Amino acid sequence: MAYRFIPQYDDEELARIQLDGLRYTVAQALKSPQYREHLGDVHPEDIRSLDDLRRLPTVDVEDLRAGYPLPLLCVPPEEVVRIHASSGTTGKRKILSYTQRDIDTFSLQMARCYELAGLTPADRMQIAVGYGLWTAGAGFQLGSEKLGMLTIPVGPGNLDMHLQLLRDMGSTCFGATASMALLMAEEVERAGIRDELKLRKVICGSETRSEKMRQAIESKLGLEASYDIAGMTEMYGPGTAMDCDAHDGLHYWADLFIIEVLNPETLQPVPVGEVGEMVVTSLRKEAVPLLRYRTHDLSRLLPGKCACGLNMPRHDRILGRSDDMIIFRGVNIYPGQIMDVIGAFPELGGEYQVELRRDERAIDHMTLTVERAQGVSADGDAALAETVGRRLHKAILARVDVRVTDAGSLPRTFSKSKRVVDLRQV
Ligand code: ZN
């Protein structure tokens, strides 16, 4: 497969690029007084191999807040050409600065993602993700223009305008959050205009979508394929990793960053294939290089080579936040792992709740309450609960008491993290 923007390195070349990039990043970071204080007595020449990365301290979101408004800035302010910010839920926004070279790398990583999705300059890209301080719209647009696609920057919401432009412009690709894509797909189905559209691909960003969502989006829109894209403001924005046609994990651009997966408690690496917190190190960032930045996102690295033939490592989709980790009888459990097991049962809906209790002998118990899918009879509940319990035991190595309940009976206002009710405080 010949690509224009996706590089094809062998393992040795990649390792060499990573080592050079790591040395550059340490040297760049030391230009910031905030970083110098954080790193202590570290010099670029101390980095002799990639293993030396582990000797560096991690950087966390507090470090980005501490330097507000231009945290961890490693270039003179006049070299900054743009800022973006993430929608911080508490306190100050995280503001990230970009030099022109950073913007160029940002366009490159997005152009690569489009290329991996099989898009070409003949495609027309309609963008439904957010614009402004938020990086998503900017990234989707930069990459689309770099690849040479006709770009239609609509932004989120505005279903009527989207529908009209999909039809009038003959858009072949749609970039949106999974819920927006699903909304669009339902609207297209309702209006009965599927055959008037040229849409063949959808790229879903910024939220994890279930297998059920993927199937609904693809079938309602009659797509050739749809893809998941990953990203975060700290690493330019969207496009850090992308699903390929093998749909077996997301390839990340290992010449642009190193991803470590660490146990969030001990900050020690977990074995390849095991779930932990993704910690990223940038290899080319100029304005705000990142050294072992804790994303608090949980995922795992996937071992082996991908069937698509691209030699770029892969990580799984995001399985939750490390802050949501449950420690149950000494085992680390992530809500995403429970969601994965539930997703494998067509008889179950997507809503669930986990309750943790401690009995009088100080033994912990976990109960999972999960909704039956619409239209499934309650007769099979007992057998279903037992099968789910067995599958969970295998997946998370913990015994769970499973209860199946009516569709629509669990509260809907719960955010993902509130699905876990911990009653163990004594
Ligand atoms: Zn692949």
Image (cartoon, rainbow, N blue to C red):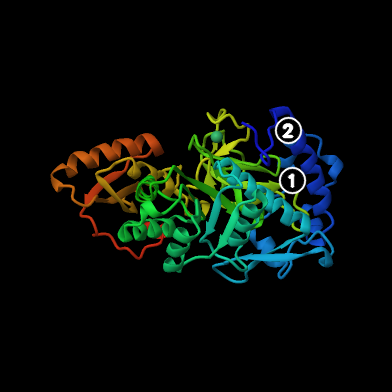
Residue 230 visible here: yes
Left or right, 225 with respect to 392, comes to: right
Write down the quadrant of residue 152 in the picture.
bottom right
Q: Residue at x 51, y 39 (%)?
A: 249
Left or right, 74 with respect to 114, comes to: right
Q: Quick check: 47 above or below 78?
A: above
Q: Residue 283 shows which numbered tag?
A: 1
Pointer 1 and pointer 2: residues touching (CB < 8 Å)? no
Q: Earlier in the sequence, mark 1 or mark 2?
A: 2
Q: Residue 399 shows which numbered tag?
A: none
Q: Quadrant of ligand 1?
A: top right
Residue sitting nearer the eye, 362 or 355: 355
Quadrant of the rendering where the N terminus is positioned: top right
Q: Residue at x 76, y 37 (%)?
A: 17
Q: Quick check: 337 above or below 413?
A: above
Amino acid type for the residue under numbered disc 2: Ala
Left or right, 328 with respect to 67, comes to: left
Residue 82 rendering spot, x and y as whole percentages: 73, 65
User: How dense is the environment of label 1, judged by Cα within 10 Å: few (below 14), some, or many (20 and up)?
Assistant: many
Residue 266 visible here: no
Residue 11 rendering spot, x and y as whole percentages: 69, 28
Amino acid type for the residue under numbered disc 1: Leu
Residue that numbered label 2 is attached to: 15
Is the CB–ligand 1 distance for label 1 below 8 Å?
Answer: no
**Which secondary structure lies at badge 2?**
helix
Residue sitting nearer the eye, 82 or 93: 82
- Report how far apart the C-alphas of labels 1 and 2 lie in the structure: 12 Å
